[in-house]
Image (cartoon, helix red, strand yellow):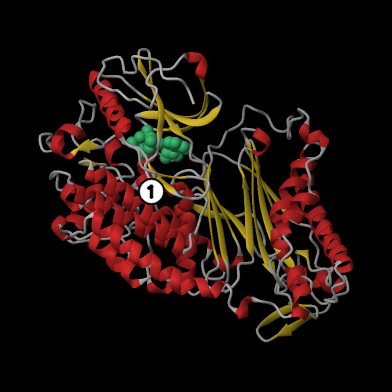
Amino acid sequence: MVEIVEPNTCVRGCCTSSTIPLHLPPSSYALLAPIARGSESTVYDARLGGARVAVKKPVLSTADDLDKFHRELQLLCKLDQPGVAKLVAAHARPPNYMLFFQFYESRNLAEKLHVQEWSPSIYQVLTIACDLAKALQYLHNLGIVHRDVKPANILLDKDLRPHLADFGLAMYKKDLKHVSVENWKSSGKPTGGFHKRNMVGTLIYMAPEILRKDIHTEKSDVYSFGISINELLTGVVPYTDLRAEAQAHTVLEMSYTEQQLTAAVVSEGLRPILAHHDIGAPSDLLSLIKRCWDPNPLHRPSFDDIVEELTFIMEHVEKVSCPSLVSPSNQCQNGMMDLQYFKELNWYDQGEQSARITNAAKSNMRLWASSFNESHYHPTLSWGSFATCGRRETMEDTHFMLPQMCNENDVHAFGIFDGHRGAAAAEFSARALPGFLQNAGYTCSPTDALIKAFTRTDEAFRDGLVLHRNSKRIIQKDWHPGCTAVAALIVRNKLFVANAGDCRAILSRSGHPFPMSKDHVASCADERTRVIKEGIKVKWLVDTWRVGPAALQVTRSIGDDDLKPAVTARPEITETSLTADDEFLVMASDGLWDVLSNEDVISIIKDTVKEPAMCSKRLATEAVERGSKDNITVIVVFLRPVSTAERIY
Ligand SMILES: Nc1ncnc2c1ncn2[C@@H]1O[C@H](COP(=O)(O)OP(=O)(O)OP(=O)(O)O)[C@@H](O)[C@H]1O
Ligand SMILES: [Mn+2]
Ligand SMILES: [Mn+2]
């Protein structure tokens, strides 16, 4: 990539390599945007000789930090294994100290699981586990312990293969024996002792012997590996799982301190909830995970054992699962093919294409540029979501999150769609509505833009349906998919909520629920009267009021072209000015509100760790526990700054 210039060493001469350039002419590289900022370093998206790389630039404030940099570089120069993040170059001379790595496109495993909500197949879990075990086996054979194995340090490439990164704490085992634990923990930083920075995010992956402040061995990496693979399998951050019994501690909630977690892991043998057989995890894998997190390091397997066992499990899974891919049950009979094709049209793409961004939007115009006075209160946002199929077999909910819409720092939009009679309308709307909203945003007020976005989405979807019905000669007259929708738009200090149907949005204002939408259901007298007036019958059926021959419970929706115009897509809009009293916004599909009251939702968030994705997940899990039988989608948006301590403990 870039030529090696002799002598190829760092400034001190302690780091050498015959293949990796260790000093670079400034013209050969360019740092672009930062992609991660830690307390010890910043990682940049960068270019080196034309290729995309990730550059880790450590903060070097003390002589110790410099020693640490050279140790890390010496070590990285020796590593060459496909499961280890590849160092491609370094610059180790004043004033610039940088490590250049091959770029891994699919972020780290923690983000993939908890931000993108990726749910891997068993085969993908086994592939990652196996690659990672081989990388750790390689390191241990070289006498190196990593000491910071956790999903955030596992980078995924575009094929989702893992690469172990962050050798900031890695050491030769022989050197560790001399280093007392106190030494690596406190390097004279102000708080001293067990520095918070080392704990945050890492504590839950630490073996009991480390928490007891004994020496780290390779078996401590085995423990962290076991915890990480279980997280990969369950999608649950350790100790946040609500399926646990009350006494099994949801440790990451505010009420638990790190001392309490440490005590529970060390003396009560507390561990995360093991993945369940239900999800198709082979029992051999589950028992392997359990042995990896055994309290006694001597009882944990070595990576030689782990690699061997995982290889065996993978071969077995391949044999069992491959034939089903071609099983006759998956093939459609001839007559069914067309209908199948029709339903499987990619409605997301259809939606995206209908709401293509207009020229106005491509120019330099600003969204709602003149709206609202800049001197007002400015909310500080953080957002997260969680969506689950729940007890249903299919997922008909969709959502979108558009923080900092069109690069406007203080314009944000979020939306949830709950499909019925199929997922088509919900899938279409999740992509179309944000586009229509943006296009309208250059010319209309926020309220009008929201109304336009809803009605245009509805029209475009119903037009699309007609078009496909005709062109594909599908005689499926009575297929009329629809969806309910709620969308929130924040423009500076103003919050607008548009709702059509029975999704709901509430604010927590001074600790109390403040409804931002009204449910549009046939049991609501006003709505029932309106629908009847527009010519559609409403009948009491079984247990509730239902609309038209389709027996819909909602009175407003996108789609449902058999019930238009009575079942209108026109949303009701609520508007409010945000102040420092507004803590957070919660939006969710009716799967949540069926079993949780507005008050329940507020109080659950109050005693959950202040991380929006975790709050969303906790609410959904709680709703499933309380018997919700529907799909559940939750978006939580904090409107005030949340301190790191509140987010982690
Ligand atoms: N080679 C890479 N390709 C893509 N992204 C990367 C790469 N290296 C690092 N990153 C991103 O930067 C983040 C931080 O990297 P790394 O863990 O090496 O830095 P760090 O400063 O030691 O972080 P911390 O100590 O806070 O965990 C990773 O989680 C990942 O999101
Ligand atoms: Mn890291
Ligand atoms: Mn690190």
Drawn side of residue 267 relative to residue 517, left or right: left
Circle 1: element type: helix
Where residue 81 sits: x, y (%)?
36, 42
Q: Residue placed farthest to the bottom in the image?
A: 542
The quarter of the rendering in which ligand 2 is drawn is top left
> Three-letter amino acid code at disc 1?
Pro
Drawn side of residue 101 relative to residue 285, left or right: right
Q: Please give the residue where the numbered disc 1 appears in the rendered image.
A: 151
Q: Residue placed farthest to the left in the image?
A: 178
Where residue 70 sits: x, y (%)?
27, 24
Where residue 515 sits: x, y (%)?
60, 56
Return the residue nearer the eye: 643 or 220: 220
Classify residue 566 by image quadrant. bottom right
Q: Residue at x 35, y 51 (%)?
A: 132
Where residue 476 sits: x, y (%)?
82, 76
Return the residue nearer the eye: 203 or 626: 203
Is residue 391 visible to the viewer in this orientation of the structure? Answer: no
Return the residue nearer the eye: 511 or 613: 613
Crowd band around label 1 with a 10 angstrom C-alpha radius: few (<14), some (14–19), many (20+):
many
Q: Residue at x 77, y 54 (%)?
A: 454
Classify residue 283 by image quadrant. bottom left
Q: Is residue 167 above or below residue 306?
A: above
Q: Residue at x 79, y 69 (%)?
A: 560
Is residue 51 visible to the viewer in this orientation of the structure? Answer: yes
Q: Is residue 478 above or below residue 618?
A: below
Drawn side of residue 495 relative to residue 143, left or right: right
Q: Is residue 107 above or below residue 228?
A: above
Q: Is residue 15 above or below residue 277?
A: above
